[in-house]
Image: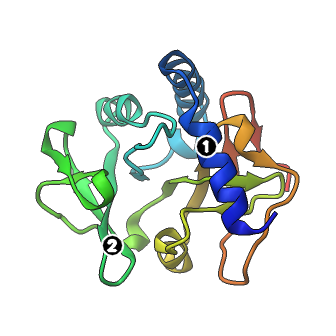
Amino acid sequence: MNKNELREAKKAERRSLSPEFIKDASYAISDALLNLPCIENATHIMVYLSAFKEPDTFKLIEKLINAKKEICVPVSDTDTFTITPSRIKSLDSLEKGAYGIYEPKETISVPTDTIDVALIPGIAFSKTGERLGFGKGYYDRFLEKFKGVKIGIGYDFQICYTIPVSEHDIKMDMIITEKRIYNDF
């Protein structure tokens, strides 16, 4: 399967998920994340804002804010296909932005080099840490400059033995699903 075929197959599979499955899987993923030493020790964490039946990150963000972590979320620039990490203090500061994904009402830019951990969405992941995104390269451009821990977040059905990759694709340091943590690569 090429990248576009795999993207379409995994997006169709994700569209078929029930709200109950998403809720249960998101809880399991959040629980696993919150118990990671890299999250416990982090001061600044970038978290994607879930959409399109991705694992829910909104409750996770609330828990991280309550744990006194500095949280930033990506703001998309649709002209340059880049993201800018923007600090948020609460979920009340969000509104629908590019592609119908929530973003801060006001962008408060956070330097990439201050972020300890970034939680990254994906359409598919390989068992060796590769990630397949939506195809516009937003996260690849961000990850080129990012030096912290890269954690891919997805459902276990999104894990493939291999996925088609390009030389600009950036590997994750670990991938977390509702069933397990993949980090043995």
**Nearer mark to the viewer, of 2 and 1:** 1
In the picture provided, is 172 more to the left or to the right than 138?
right
Vertical relation: 32 (above or below) 42: above
List the residue tagged with mark 1: 12
Q: Quadrant of the C terminus?
A: bottom right
Point out residue 134 in the picture as x, y percentages from the top left corner. Answer: 54, 63
Vertical relation: 101 (above or below) 55: below
Which residue lies at the image location 50% right of the left edge and 40% below the top edge?
54
Vertical relation: 137 (above or below) 37: below
Numbered tag placed on residue 183 in the rendering: none
Mark 2 crowdedness (10 Å alpha carbons): few <14, some 14-19, many ≥20: few
Vertical relation: 12 (above or below) 151: above
Nearest to the observer: residue 12 or residue 41:
12
Which residue lies at the image location 73% right of the left edge and 27% below the top edge?
179
Identity of the amino acid at label 1? Answer: Ala
Nearest to the observer: residue 43 or residue 112:
112
Numbered tag placed on residue 111 in the rendering: 2
